[in-house]
Amino acid sequence: MQPLLTSLKRKFARKTPHSAPARVAAHNTTLPVSFEISGEPLAPGVTLLPESTRFVVHSRHAVAMDLCLYDPKDATRETARVRMQRTECDLWHATVHGVKAGTLYGYRAHGPWLPKSAMRFNAKKLMLDPYARAIHGKPNEAEHMRTLPDPRHSLGRIDNGAEALKCVVIDGSFDWTGDVKPRVPWQDTVICELHVKGFTQTHPDVPAKLRGTYAGLAHPSVTSYLRDLGITSVQLLPVHQHLDDGFLLGRDLTNYWGYNTIGFFAAQNTYAAATDPQEQVREFKTMVKALHAAGIEVILDVVYNHTAEGNEHGPSIMFRGLDDHSYYRHHFGENGADYVNVTGCGNSVDSASQPALRLILDSLRYWVTEMHVDGFRFDLAVTVARDEKDGFNRQSPFLSAIAQDPVLSRVKLIAEAWDISRMDSYQVGNFPEPWRELNGKYRDTVRSWWRGDPGATAEFAKRFCGSQDVFGWNQRPPLASINFLTSHDGFTLLDLVSYEHKHNEANNEDNRDGDSNNHSTNCGVEGPTEDPTVLQTRGRLRRGLIATMMCSLGVPFLTAGDERGRTQRGNNNAYCQDSDISWLDWSSCDAEMLAFTRQITAFRRSHEVFRRGSYFDGKLNPATGMRDVLWLESDGTLLHHEEWHQETRRSFGARLGSASDESSTLLLLFNNSSEEQLFVLPGDPSILWSLVFDTALSPSFPSKSPPALAGAEKYPLQAQGMVCLTLTAGHREALEPKV
């Protein structure tokens, strides 16, 4: 391989300026070009200078690099081509005078086509700048992006400069005056996951031209809705520029979720109301500023584990054509280089390599410092946390870099703590501080318990108490757990209690896609029904699920629409459904569910016991004279270890004390059976309890003060219900068991 590379470098060196002075005439351009390096060291990306623009791109294995400029008014017309110069750190650079914001550009990387050595150069394909701040063009995968089987045949010989997506030179100036980041503490955080387009696409109060856009999400009717719901932080499905897959376009579908990145610094252009790329960037910033003004944080769902280039048969858009060897993980075996695919998407970004790691960190810092976002949720975070040997490592280059970064270590960091296909793919509980993790065990266990699965009670109590068995072993608090019941990936809350089986026929994959193990129930009828008994059961289960999440230790995570009865008609993998299957239908609302969600969120906010930063220990607090938790049988006696694991256990109680003397004492009662259970209330007749909510009732929060209930009285705990009572009279010491 080395002799071939040497000959190629000599070949292209004849076309490259020798030790160029400050200004030289570059080939195929009338614009003055400079290769002088002065001031700060070069960094990848584009820098606007007073009279010129500097372009810098990384490639270790290219032997030549061309910068191609295009007319903003006619993106098919190339206006100039500049042969760049290589400098240290494998950076190629050129400073072009007269280039202003709005100019379109791309790169052509020259080098060998040696797939077995992880080199796939083809200078006939225009590459995107991995550091591009905006991307121009319709982000659809197309045949002209491919080099198959090699540059000498068919598709590989097509020059796609005219048709290719283009990068845009962006002026990043913006008036951030008055913007104050909410900086919501984790104990007060309530996350709502939503899709920028889907959340406002049908919103009647958002002007039609703004629906489904960043500007639509910034509309006062939207921010006030989120604030009234008790949301402190929105988690946006991917807003990095993504590509719509060719196989989906062939089915008249698109990659709606957007986990198919081609621009780690560029906001998705189709989510902007503005058509000018410069204004699209400003529109995103305006959205962030508006959400901050409403006291709401912005968390981005980011995809650094793979790109839209897929496997060896995929398109060449950025990494593959610039330096496949440096940016992707490969397995080098007897058959040459194969892509490491722990993502299920054909490739895995090599976050242990210097150029890829630098890009990821630079991208994250850009979104924090320039776009003012407040945190990130990392898709398939285990892939990004793999080391140079492709193994998950809590001291991997990525995790170590984040931990010491003065910017990134201070924002919200959430890991989807798994990837696929490896023995070490599932890592829930193993990320270091200050990371939080999506707790898949919480989701599955809480669903199973409310469905009535036998033997799930002990596990349910562990998840309710912050999953100490998952996070406590390495001194991480219950707030390390992101407690979610649903997310974009799977059933909505309504569908979770309406369908036993997935119904993904609209995806045109014969219902083969999507997970078949959903821990769901249809309550007797598959799908929609008018049966009042079934509808009542579904309502009780939904309220019980939401109440459980809001009263659990950890950070609650709500999927947008669950609070108002959104359905995907049984589709649990709507990744390709840019349609009413995925959009929030603002013309339809379960008003009772919406009111309940608002009330239970406010209830959590007013009780610090659910927002505590330490686990329950069951020990007596001398300041209050109470234990922080007591577990109760339905007859009022203490629940013992062996009773937790009874297959037939369907109900239990939890008396919660508080760390402060001023806080109220609460009693929570749970019943997942289909029958009423009488529950003896703690204390003697001098103890009085008052009902806060009963999820089996409709409405669940009483509209007026209910009559007091005396200790030792039997409370009718209805089927599939969760009850909360508060102590209103009597000495709390009387609630403690006598030793």
Image (cartoon, rainbow, N blue to C red):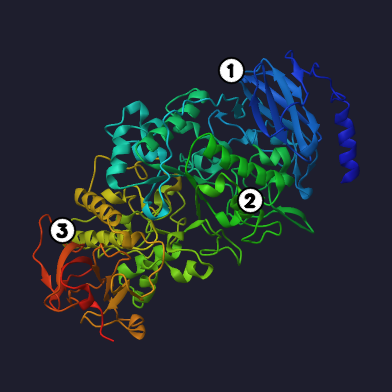
Q: In terms of depth relative to the viewer, which is nearer, 533 or 655?
A: 655
Element type at mark 2: helix
Disc 2 versus disc 3: distance between alpha carbons?
51 Å
**Between discs 1 and 2, the one toward the N terminus:** 1
Q: Give the residue drawn at x 58%, y 19%.
A: 72
Question: Which numbered marker is on residue 698?
Answer: 3
Q: Give the residue drawn at x 17%, y 57%.
A: 701
Q: Nearer the viewer, mark 1 or mark 2?
A: 2
Disc 3 versus disc 1: distance between alpha carbons?
61 Å
Q: Is residue 309 among what the camera can see?
A: no
Point out the residue furthest to the front here. 623
Q: Residues within 10 Å of mark 1 (few under 14, many from 20)?
A: few
Disc 1 marks which amino acid?
Asp
Q: Residues within 10 Å of mark 2 (few under 14, many from 20)?
A: some
Question: Which numbered marker is on residue 74?
Answer: 1
- Return the x and y of residue 548 as percentages of the image width and height: 31, 63
In the rendered structure, the answer to whether residue 69 lies left or right of residue 708 reads right
Above or below 628: residue 378 = above
Quarter of the image for residue 659 reads bottom left
- Return the x and y of residue 78 as percentages of the image width and height: 67, 19
Quarter of the image for residue 162 reads top right
Quarter of the image for residue 60 reads top right
In the rendered structure, the answer to whether residue 595 lies left or right of residue 578 reads left
Quickly name the residue at label 2.
Answer: 401
- Return the x and y of residue 177 as percentages of the image width and height: 44, 28
Disc 2 marks which amino acid?
Ala
Quadrant (top left, top right, bottom left, bottom right) of the C terminus = bottom left
Q: Give the residue drawn at x 26%, y 48%.
A: 564
Disc 3 marks which amino acid?
Ser
Question: Which numbered marker is on residue 209?
Answer: none
In the rendered structure, the answer to whether residue 228 lies left or right of residue 123 reads left
